[in-house]
Image (cartoon, helix red, strand yellow):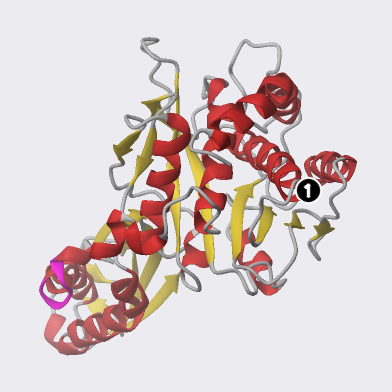
């Protein structure tokens, strides 16, 4: 391939396939399936891959699939899409509106799936022509919204022997054609906690003879966020915010139990791993000072998605090459969660934002909203970016070597 070889090959491929891919996305959009129920979606993807001569395998729970492209002993790059929809009603007025009550592709996973299918078809063609210096593993993951389908993929050996992994996520705040990148945390961890405080209870006239449970609960509520901000590196942005508190039923009776519930958000992987033990110790030290017993229930969600610098540089180099040098913009950090983070606990990789807003439209869509939709040109752009990223990560001829990428400096 020459300098513009990849670009023109992608042009040629998409001129024949883009309409088919848009139809594929609209079909998925009309028949959305929520987490672990993606049977039709899995079958549709499987049939299309098989028609191209590929041999996908379905994951043990029956939805989601893996497929390998290429052979030989070169590097292995994994690309991941998610298949599931959300349990909300589709409120759009479009021909491809959801036909399933209370199910809607409002997070753009139909787009992610279609982009990965298109990428598979292109890379299969590239491999057949001898242009793939390694192997690509495509992961069509189930159940991103009901964590954690990523853990099923890991348990099934989905990233075994993979050197790097990449994914895209629709971003309705970015114009179509733009790619948002970020080194470090791009999504956050969001866990739930519940603190239950118990004590002997008694009359409010005699707090000294019992344990003043409401006062102790109040101390836990105010002391914990303050203590956390002194015990954890502020750069980790670990924050505890309470959402519910309840105790007692009468003005003159000290209750014998009370509950506070809240969320813990975090942008740093190390702080996320340390958070449960730290919270437990802090809660116990406050509770014991007031003679009550406190139990912490810590409900883990997903880790923060921490993008690796060289992987981000590969995405950026790929975007420069096939989308133009002004395609890449800096993505802000999101406090939302994304289970792609689980893969990055094992191997380096990056999640990039795929712009889906129609330029100049004034559309103010957000993901997880019933009116969410995309500018479908994002599909072809996603195929270009994922294909070029895979080839860059495999060190295909004409792509920059990793050591020469700008990210290598601050890795
Ligand atoms: Zn979502
Ligand atoms: Zn999503």
Q: Position of residue 277 (x, y in %)?
A: 33, 84
Element type at mark 1: helix
- Judge whether residue 232 is colored magenta: yes
**Which residue is tagged 1?**
128
Q: Position of residue 403 (x, y in %)?
A: 35, 64
Q: Is residue 398 visible?
A: yes
Residue in the image at 22% along x and 66% along y: 236
Residue in the image at 57% along x and 49% along y: 145
- Judge whether residue 392 is colored magenta: no
Left/right of residue 273 with respect to residue 38 in the rendered view: left
Residue in the image at 40% along x and 10% along y: 361
Decide which of 14, 63 is in the foreground and name it.
14
Residue in the image at 38% along x and 19% along y: 364
Query: Is the CB of mark 1 within 8 Å of ligand 2?
Result: no
Q: Which residues are magenta?
A: 230-234
Q: Position of residue 122 (x, y in %)?
A: 69, 39
Q: Is residue 222 visible?
A: no
Q: Main secondary structure of the magenta part?
A: helix
In the displayed structure, would residue 350 be above or below residue 117? below
């Amino acid at each position: 391939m020459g300098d513009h070889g990849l670009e023109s090959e992608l042009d040629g491929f998409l001129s024949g396939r883009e309409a088919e891919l848009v139809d594929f996305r609209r079909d998925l959009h009309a028949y959305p399936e929520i987490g672990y129920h993606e049977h039709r979606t899995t079958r549709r993807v499987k049939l299309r891959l098989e028609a191209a001569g590929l041999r996908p395998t379905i994951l043990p729970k029956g939805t989601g699939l893996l497929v390998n492209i290429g052979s030989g002993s070169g590097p292995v790059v994994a690309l991941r899409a998610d298949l599931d929809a959300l349990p909300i009603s589709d409120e759009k007025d479009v021909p491809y509106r959801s036909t399933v009550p209370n199910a809607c592709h409002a997070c753009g996973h139909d787009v992610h799936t279609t982009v990965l299918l298109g990428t598979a078809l292109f890379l299969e063609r590239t491999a057949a022509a001898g242009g793939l210096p390694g192997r690509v593993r495509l992961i069509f993951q189930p159940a991103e919204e009901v964590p954690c389908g990523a853990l099923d993929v890991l348990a099934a050996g989905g990233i075994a022997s993979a050197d790097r992994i990449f994914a895209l996520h629709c971003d309705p705040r970015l114009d179509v054609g733009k790619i948002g990148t970020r080194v470090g945390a791009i999504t956050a961890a969001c866990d739930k906690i519940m603190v239950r405080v118990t004590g002997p209870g008694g009359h409010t006239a005699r707090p000294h003879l019992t344990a003043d449970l409401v006062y102790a609960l109040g101390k836990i509520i105010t002391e914990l966020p303050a203590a956390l901000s002194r015990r954890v590196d502020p750069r980790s942005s670990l924050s505890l915010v309470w959402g519910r508190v309840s105790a007692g039923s009468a003005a003159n009776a000290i209750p014998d139990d009370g509950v506070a519930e809240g969320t813990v958000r975090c942008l740093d992987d190390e702080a996320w791993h340390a958070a449960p033990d730290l919270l437990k110790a802090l809660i116990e030290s406050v509770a014991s000072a007031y003679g009550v017993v406190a139990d912490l229930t810590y409900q883990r969600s997903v880790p923060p998605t921490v993008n690796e610098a060289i992987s981000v540089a590969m995405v950026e180099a790929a975007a420069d090459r096939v989308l133009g040098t002004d395609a890449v913009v800096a993505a802000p950090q999101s406090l939302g969660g994304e289970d792609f983070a689980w893969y990055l606990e094992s191997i380096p990789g990056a999640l990039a934002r795929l712009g889906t807003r129609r330029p100049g439209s004034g559309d103010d869509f957000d993901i997880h909203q019933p009116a969410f939709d995309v500018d479908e040109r994002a599909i072809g752009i996603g195929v270009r970016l994922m294909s070029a990223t895979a080839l860059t990560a495999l060190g295909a001829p004409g792509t920059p070597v990793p050591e020469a990428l700008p990210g290598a400096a601050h890795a």
